[in-house]
Image (cartoon, rainbow, N blue to C red):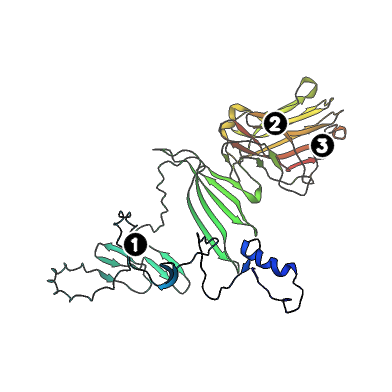
Amino acid sequence: MAKTLSKTGITNASTILAKHVTQSVDALTGDEDYDIVISGSLEVDGPLTLSDTDSTSGITTILVLDGTTVKSQTGGADGSSGSSGTSGSSGSSGTSGVSGSSGSSGTSGSSGSSGTSGSSGTSVGISLTTGQVTFADSATTITGNDNLFFDNSDKTLRVKSIDGQPGLIIRNEDTSITSGNDFGMLSFEGFDDSNYIEGVKLIAEATGSWNVGATPSRLEIHVNDGNSLELHTTFNANGLLRVKSLRDNIDTNLIGGGTGPTSNPPRQIVGDGTSGDLKTMVGGRMLMEKDDFGTLDWADGDTGYAYSTATKTFAEGSINDVNSTGDFVISISDTITGSFYPGDIFLFGIQIFTVSSTVNVKYQYKLNGAVRTGNLYDPAGNIVQIDSGDSNADHIIMGQLTYWKRGDVDWGFFPSSHFQKLE
């Protein structure tokens, strides 16, 4: 901030100090910044230089020189017009204005002419009585028939016929049925308080590829054991294949009559991986023509008996000199297996003479083409044996065998507990 000249200390009879003089010198020489206020006229002889002036704008009062006197004047005279400048470049286009409001709707046009009338629909006749199941008798008639009747009281569908065969056909239109394909199914369901559960299911299954003249099939009956459906019984064109209660399975085992020495009857012939149809039947023939085979001599190699005559299923004889361990085997000759039917009954009896070694009495069968043997049992579940206590014709072994056959190569006797040792 600029200083001002001060008269402080300058009075009459006072001492004049250097500062009283130097302040004026500093102000006039510009060595110090002072604000100097002039009252009256200022005459300057020589150039007048104004420096460090402040810039401003919008001032209408200006200083002018009137001869040698500086005076103030409001506004200055307008100067002549300058030449026009070059045109500037065009500015960018402004944004489009908002769309105007829609105009009012025009008046409605006149109605067009009516179209031609459509053709009349076809009448459908309905002829029914209560309970009849409806069906289309023709393109224009829905009808019913007392032969196809639904009884709503017991929720039963009835099909009857007076002069024909009533029936239900389940058709599968697959043209490439192969072995293992299920081509039909009938299921019986019940409600268990939360879901509908199958209790019994019938399944029609192909056992080979179907073509003209060859449609191999079998019927499976599945029964719920309380937890899930289990295969119970199987039939094919040859009859019964499998019964769960008898543990008779086409692919795992054959079963025979009688009980075994364990708590899991009936006794089984186990043959893993077997194939082909096991033909079984309840009961069978008993051909009572007897084959008296005489006395067998163990020492001469007579260690078994084979049924060899197609008409003789009752064999009777004796054995002597059983003097080494081994098995006495009852079998059937390959040459006559085709002469018998599954279920046929064979009887066997043998009187025992001298015995010095114990041997087991067994039956023979063929499974998967391989010859095998199995033990025979008495009703108590004991293996039937010839031992030293049977010497001197005191004992006779008698029993019954049941024949079975599978395909063309497997055959034999079922295991049996129908053998007794008589004294």
Between 253 and 377, the one lying in front of the other is 253
Determine which residue is flagged by label 2. 372
Q: Residue at x 41, y 73 (%)?
A: 73
Residue 307 seen in the current view: no
Determine which residue is flagged by label 1. 94
Residue type for callout 3: His
From what the image shows, is residue 306 above or below residue 404?
above
Disc 1 secondary structure class: loop
Residue 300 spot, x, y in % from top left: 77, 20
Residue 181 spot, x, y in % from top left: 49, 44
Residue 377 seen in the current view: yes
The quadrant the C terminus occupies is top right
Q: Please tell me which of labels 3 and 1 falls first in the chain.
A: 1
Residue type for callout 2: Arg
Residue type for callout 1: Gly
Depth check, mark 3 against mark 1: the one in front is 1
> Splitting the image into 4 quarters, where does residue 32 fall?
bottom right
Residue 46 spot, x, y in % from top left: 50, 60
From what the image shows, is residue 66 above or below residue 186?
below
Q: Please tell me which of labels 3 and 2 falls first in the chain.
A: 2
Depth check, mark 1 against mark 2: the one in front is 1
Residue 402 spot, x, y in % from top left: 65, 40
Disc 3 secondary structure class: loop
Q: Which mark is residue 32?
A: none
Crowding at label 1, few (<14), some or many (≥20) Cα neighbours within 10 Å?
A: few
Determine which residue is flagged by label 3. 395
Q: Please tell me which of labels 1 and 2 falls first in the chain.
A: 1
Between 110 and 34, the one lying in front of the other is 34
The quadrant the N terminus occupies is bottom right
Tag 3–tag 2 contact (CB < 8 Å)? no
Disc 2 secondary structure class: strand
Q: Residue at x 71, y 41 (%)?
A: 416
